[in-house]
Image: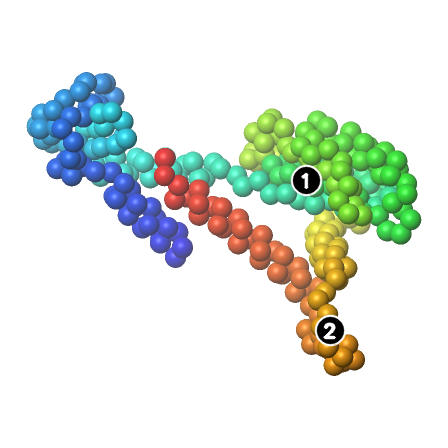
């Protein structure tokens, strides 16, 4: 249903965007013939007469040029070819997502290997990877351990990724962002790449590493950190004695883990849908 509405809107925009034949209200135009050759600047009446003699339409394709540029083509065929190119462009375009990988200073080498393989799968699929090293308690005093672990992580994916954002502190976490190389992006759509990703994911799951469970855990940790940050901010307190003696009770029911995960995924899906819609109806 959405695809049909989108196609109708796109077609409506195409029809409104281009002026044809008698709709063109300028004295002179530059004429491009059906074979692509430049006929030069012509009086609008002569250009219209030339188009009629060929049983074609005069289509204004560059109204802001001086003088405007018009092509002699069949208008229906012109819209069809243009829509066909837009569909092909949207089909080949891939929305790059940012996948998360969570680490701790106490992450073992065995578990780190699983994390690196998961990051490699994300990169091979054409996505960016945000690596987050979280600290609890006095762990933040040993930043050199975190740096060494992140260096080892980068070495494990250096054939697929570039460092987009180097390690930096964000509160009680150290983060860095890895982006796929151009060669990695070019191979992301290949069938062999997708088959390799699925095979490695199944092998790791059989070995005890559940990629989906890790993603859910990462979402919950992000929500927990946001909630803690909001709770740490000072709230406005009334100066009246009644307000001091009887603080307002918080009647908000805490959300379950499943609700938090569902809300986060819904927000990401809506953001991707909005981006696709903007690209779909973008004018050339």
Q: Quadrant of the N terminus?
A: bottom left
Q: CA distance from mark 1 to mark 2?
A: 48 Å
User: Is residue 76 something one can see in this rendering?
Assistant: yes
**Residue at image mark 2:** 239
Picture coordinates of residue 168 (x, y %)? 76, 38
Q: Residue at x 22, y 18 (%)?
A: 38
Q: Residue 32 vs residue 191: left or right?
A: left
Write down the quadrant of residue 155 in the picture.
top right
Q: What colouring method underlies this structural image?
A: rainbow
Q: Is residue 236 above or below residue 216?
A: below
**Residue at image mark 1:** 129
Q: Residue at x 69, y 34 (%)?
A: 165
Q: Residue at x 44, y 45 (%)?
A: 278
> Which of the pair 256/246 is nearer the observer?
246
Q: Residue 282 vs residue 119: left or right?
A: left
Disc count in the image? 2
Q: Residues within 10 Å of mark 2 (few under 14, many from 20)?
A: few
Write down the quadrant of residue 119 in the picture.
top right
């Amino acid at each position: 249903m959405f695809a049909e509405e989108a196609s109708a809107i796109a077609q409506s925009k195409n029809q409104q965007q281009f002026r044809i034949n008698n709709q063109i209200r300028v004295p002179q135009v530059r004429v491009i013939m059906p074979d692509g050759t430049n006929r030069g600047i012509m009086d609008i009446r002569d250009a219209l007469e030339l188009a009629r003699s060929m049983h074609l339409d005069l289509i204004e394709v560059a109204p802001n040029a001086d003088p405007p540029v018009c092509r002699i083509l069949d208008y229906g065929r012109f819209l069809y070819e243009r829509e066909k190119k837009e569909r092909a462009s949207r089909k080949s375009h891939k929305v790059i997502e940012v996948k998360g990988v969570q680490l701790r200073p106490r992450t073992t080498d065995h578990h780190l290997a699983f994390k690196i393989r998961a990051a490699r799968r994300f990169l091979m699929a054409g996505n960016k990877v945000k690596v987050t090293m979280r600290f609890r308690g006095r762990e933040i005093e040993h930043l050199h351990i975190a740096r060494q672990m992140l260096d080892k992580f980068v070495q494990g994916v250096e054939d697929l990724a570039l460092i987009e954002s180097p390690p930096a502190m964000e509160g009680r976490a150290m983060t860095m962002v890895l982006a796929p190389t151009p060669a990695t992006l070019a191979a992301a759509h290949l069938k062999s790449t997708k088959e390799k990703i699925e095979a490695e994911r199944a092998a790791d799951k059989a070995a005890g590493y559940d990629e989906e469970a890790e993603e859910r855990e990462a979402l919950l940790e992000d929500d927990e950190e946001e909630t803690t940050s909001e709770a740490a901010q000072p709230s406005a307190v009334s100066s009246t004695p009644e307000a001091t003696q009887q603080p307002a009770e918080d009647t908000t029911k805490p959300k379950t883990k499943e609700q938090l995960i569902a809300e986060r995924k819904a927000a990401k899906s809506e953001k991707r849908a909005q981006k696709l819609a903007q690209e779909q109806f973008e004018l050339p």
